[in-house]
Image: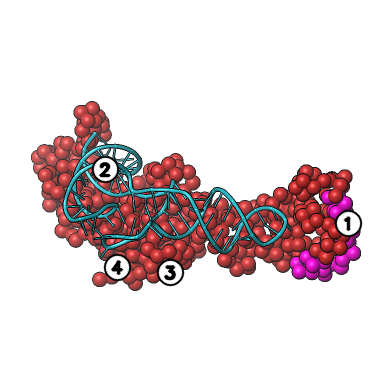
Chain colours: A red, B cyan
RNA sequence: GGCCCUAUCGUCUAACGGUUAGGACAGCGGGUUUUCAGUCCGCUAAUCUGGGUUCGAUUCCCAGUAGGGUCACCA
């Protein structure tokens, strides 16, 4: 049998980290088994639909390489494909209605005409008695005639699942094992709302069945409503698919990740300069691991190693330090042209006019920072000194416990020496050799020469070395002048 | 409160019932060095508690505790 999984977001917000992880697991399991990954959209709550959310979700998944085989995908715009559609639930209303009515005629469901006030009142009373709020099956006692007359007079109504009492619903979750729940703890869930839209519970069961889904992979928060779904499958006489509930992703607080607990939209991470590949690698390890010591995986390797048995049961706290580490690692392993292409938007955002500089220069700048970057968004601040003259803190120019006079002297000597060098000497190996020879010939202490030289060039307490910086400036026709100008200004400040 | 899920270093996690409880991130120390980063080497750090079962429990069972999830005409 073909393995078919689905990701079924509702367009009520941008794709978040948890959604990405769920989509990834579904995708991996389908690919692993040469099956199909389907993207269906659960837009059954008109009020909560957020404009742009659908596009964001579908586009982001495609950006991460999780392109669905059926349902919605992104290809210069929102597209949909597949034989079992439509894949937008709001376009399947007649299907849900038909199925809900089928359950009514089977006595597995019934019409309910209760008003919101009555429901609220009853809930309140139950809560006061410390009872779990449940519908009291009031409308189950309506006679056929009463129902007929209410329906013909267009009284607002819903269809509810008729949950039998004193039964045990059991199902096997592929992560958690067997789970048993008494039907006495299951509410007569609304299946079809008074506006004609299905609730999640009806729609998800009908669609998963009709779309031949074999494995439902979704967050742990769905475990409590799974018994309702099991009841529905059996009411329809359908076989249940496999259920897989990976553990929740937790914020530092230990609570489920949510808007309240900080940035969770994938878009936010991308904008901070996390790479999609790194993020995917990181997210894969939230609640899953390959049982080996390998930690760096690309999508292809993830498909190879993935299996449902390796999903673990307890919630995973998002560890940003580790994300930073993985991201830095991916940055360091990236080809410079690739990195350059991705970093340009961040440079532009930092106010650097990239179009005014030769690409060879920009790439060299980047090469220096490549091993230092954790997030692409840091790049602007780090390389600023290549594009504008730094402000100097006189104290910073002075090496450790050295004194001002020596530093000033060294700086001036270095300036004069560099002046005599031809521009083509301003390349890593040659400039390093020349300067080091000079320092030695002058009897300077290395630290007392190289530290102020570096600070004069960068203005920073931490930066790449002076030879590396000069090498980068060497890629500019006016590079030598810039270097001399900075030494000069630093000396003036010290003086 | 009812129901459900979970429990190994600070964090992510590994360990056919027998290991000095392993790895990674973070932290700390050191080497490389003019600073930072990187890289290399090293160190600190964990089986929630109590009962069983067993020759032997991190591992199996039960209870407690703690944390989380969920109880809508939201998904």
Location of the C terminus of chain A (image quadrant): top right
Badge 4 or badge 1: first in the primary sequence: 4
The residue that label 1 is drawn on is A413
Highlighted magenta segment, given as a residue range: A407-435
Q: x%, y% of residue A9? A: 37, 54
* Residue nearest the observer in this picture, A320 or A60: A320
> Residue A18: horizontal and vertical position, in percent?
41, 52
Q: Chain of mark 2?
A: A
Question: What residue sits 21% from the left and 51% below the top?
Answer: A179
Q: Nearer the viewer, residue A254 or B75?
A: A254
Mark 4 residue crowding within 10 angstroms, few (<14) / some (14–19) / many (20+): some
Q: CA distance from mark 2 to mark 4?
A: 35 Å
For the point 50% across and 60% down, the residue is A278
Residue marked by disc 2: A194
Reply yes or no: does residue A434 show up in magenta: yes
Residues at discs 4 and 1 both on one chain: yes
What is the distance, in whole Å, between disc 4 and disc 3 at their CAs? Answer: 19 Å
Q: Depth-wise, is mark 2 or mark 1 nearer the camera?
A: 1
For the residue labelled by badge 4, is the local secondary structure a helix, a strand or a loop?
loop
């Amino acid at each position: 049998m073909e393995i078919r999984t689905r990701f079924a977001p509702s367009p009520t917000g941008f794709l978040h980290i948890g959604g990405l992880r769920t989509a990834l697991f579904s995708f991996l399991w389908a690919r692993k088994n040469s099956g199909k990954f389907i993207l269906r959209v659960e837009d059954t709550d008109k009020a909560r639909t957020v404009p742009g959310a659908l596009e964001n979700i579908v586009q982001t998944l495609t950006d991460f390489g999780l392109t669905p085989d059926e349902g919605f995908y992104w290809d210069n715009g929102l597209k949909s494909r597949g034989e079992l559609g439509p894949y937008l639930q709001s376009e399947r209303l007649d299907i849900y209605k038909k199925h809900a009515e089928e359950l009514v005629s089977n006595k597995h469901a019934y019409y309910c005409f209760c008003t919101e006030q009555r429901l609220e009142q009853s809930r309140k009373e139950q809560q006061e008695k410390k009872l779990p709020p449940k519908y009291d099956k009031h409308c189950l006692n309506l006679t056929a005639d009463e129902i007929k007359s209410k329906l013909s007079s267009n009284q607002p109504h819903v269809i509810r699942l008729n949950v039998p009492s004193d039964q045990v619903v059991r199902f096997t979750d592929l992560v958690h094992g067997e789970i048993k729940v008494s039907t006495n703890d299951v509410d007569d869930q609304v299946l079809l709302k008074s506006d004609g839209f299905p609730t999640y519970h009806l729609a998800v069961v009908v669609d998963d069945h009709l779309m031949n889904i074999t494995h439902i992979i979704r967050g742990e928060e769905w475990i409590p409503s799974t018994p309702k779904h099991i009841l529905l499958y059996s009411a329809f006489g359908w076989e249940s698919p496999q259920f897989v509930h990976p553990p929740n992703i937790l914020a530092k607080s230990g609570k489920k990740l949510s808007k309240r607990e900080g940035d969770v939209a994938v878009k936010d991470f991308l904008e901070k300069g996390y790479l999609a590949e790194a993020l995917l690698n990181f997210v894969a390890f939230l609640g899953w691991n390959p049982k080996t010591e390998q930690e760096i995986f690309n999508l292809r390797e993830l498909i190879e190693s993935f299996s449902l048995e390796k999903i673990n049961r307890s919630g995973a706290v998002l560890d940003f330090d580790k994300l930073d580490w993985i991201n830095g690692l991916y940055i360091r392993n990236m080809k410079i042209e690739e990195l350059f292409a991705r970093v340009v938007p961040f440079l532009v955002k930092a106010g650097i006019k990239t179009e005014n500089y030769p690409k060879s220069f920009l790439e060299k700048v980047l090469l220096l920072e490549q091993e230092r970057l954790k997030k692409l968004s840091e790049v602007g601040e780090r390389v600023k000194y290549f594009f504008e003259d730094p402000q100097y803190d006189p104290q910073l120019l002075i090496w450790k416990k050295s004194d001002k006079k020596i530093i000033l002297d060294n700086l001036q000597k270095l300036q004069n020496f560099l002046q005599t060098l031809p521009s083509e000497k301003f390349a890593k190996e040659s400039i390093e050799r020349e300067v080091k020879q000079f320092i030695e010939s002058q009897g300077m202490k290395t630290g007392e020469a190289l530290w102020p030289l570096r600070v004069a060039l960068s203005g920073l307490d931490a930066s790449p070395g002076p030879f590396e910086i000069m090498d980068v400036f060497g890629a500019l026709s006016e590079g030598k002048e810039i270097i001399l100008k900075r030494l000069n200004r630093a000396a003036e400040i010290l003086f």
